[in-house]
Image (cartoon, rainbow, N blue to C red):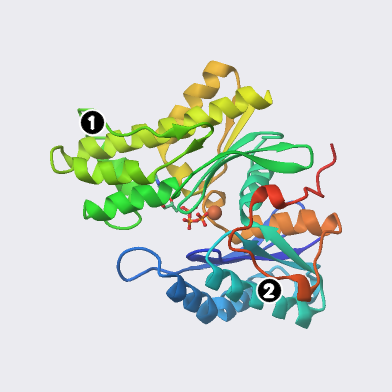
Amino acid sequence: TLVLGIEGTAWNLSAAVVNEDEVVCEVTHTYKPATGGIHPREAAQHHAQFAFWVISNLFDEIAEKNISPGDIDAISFSQGPGLGACLRTVATAARALSLSLEIPLVGVNHCVAHVEIGRWKTPAKDPVVLYASGANTQVLAYRRGKYRVFGETLDIGVGNALDKFARSGHLSHPGGPQIEMYAKDSVNYVNLPYVVKGMDFSFSGLSTAATDALQKHTLEDVCYSLQENAFAMLVEVTERALAHTGKNEVLLGGGVGANMRLREMLDIMCDDRGASFYVPEKRFMGDNGAMIAWLGLLMYKAGDTIRVEDSHVNPNYRPDMVDVTWLKE
Ligand code: ATP
Ligand code: FE2
């Protein structure tokens, strides 16, 4: 089975072809804002402008492996969550491919795709998943037919909180890697808010407080303290989800998962609890076309396809709205 998947919920436009065994080819083109953060309309224009480029390059690459577009069994795309304008652009490209190649269309939930690529590319079987990216931050786990959201951000994603702080400290975008670098040279912990409410977390106040703290403390110390607090909040909720569900695996996903301090803290927590900790290869942690193609393949094989006329996007598509048709209990 061969499935072509397209991701474009935010700044990464990425398309891939996968089969049951491997990612056959992947082509990505990334929107880079001239200044500041992501401008949704510009990002959508970028995706519209480069959709043809990405798909035709992908077709050239599969041709080198003696695969023709006619060999592809289904087209999948990110139906949400994400920026409305970006989602609509990618959906249009996916529908056009589905109609012209006369093959089924599969609508994929972006968050669930992060989970499934992690389950594919690591030994994790039934993990508690910490999905920590720019716009999304959720703790997920499978229970009775759905990936349930055990905890999530009440405001912005942890990555966006890091990026927002970084801009105020005049660091280049994206801020996460810069903050990680400066944090290594810190000598003092600075007191910052720690906000976990029930099983949910909030990052907006923490980001603002870190910006304010720059008036009195060094950039290094604030970067370090911001990381410690934000990541401790993530680890606390992940640990409680483990305890609550009785599961014994943790899987990390999302672009913030590149952070070595976050990995270290999760690793220590898992060690203490006798749980296994899994991190996929970096290319499968941030947004990527392969994860959309892979979940598309799982859903296609389960008969979980949609008609073009029912293929609307949903910027607020939650993972717990998806029936996990491809897993047998
Ligand atoms: P999504 O739609 O999944 O929210 P996104 O485009 O915001 O997508 P990703 O590619 O998953 O996200 O992640 C980007 C985020 O990851 C940025 O906020 C960036 O600062 C953060 N990030 C990248 N590397 C690191 C790092 N080493 N430490 C902390 N944060 C990082
Ligand atoms: Fe993502």
Rendered location of residue 35, percent (x, y)? 30, 68
Closer to the camera, 40 or 265? 40
**Which amino acid type is shown beneath numbered disc 1?**
Val
Rendered location of residue 270, percent (x, y)? 54, 23
| Side of 234 relative to 93 (left or right) | left
141 relative to 101, above or below: above
Q: Residue at x 82, y 78 (%)?
A: 102
| Side of 99 relative to 52 (left or right) | right
**Which amino acid type is shown beneath numbered disc 2?**
Ala
Closer to the camera, 92 or 280? 92
Q: Residue at x 32, y 71 (%)?
A: 34
Q: Find residue 271 and name its label.
A: none
Q: Residue at x 30, y 48 (%)?
A: 178
| Side of 228 relative to 103 (left or right) | left
Q: Find residue 190 and name its label.
A: 1
Q: Element under label 1? A: loop
Which quadrant holds the C terminus?
top right
Q: Is residue 171 visible?
A: no
Q: Element under label 2? A: helix
Rendered location of residue 16, percent (x, y)? 64, 64
228 relative to 273, above or below: below
206 relative to 107, above or below: above
The residue where tag 2 is placed is: 94
Asked where in the image residue 219 lies, by quadrant, the reply is top left
Asked where in the image residue 39 lies, by quadrant, the reply is bottom left
Q: Seen from this angle, which residue lies furthest front?
A: 197
Which quadrant holds the N terminus?
bottom right
Q: Residue at x 39, y 37 (%)?
A: 230
Mark closer to the observer (1, 2) = 1
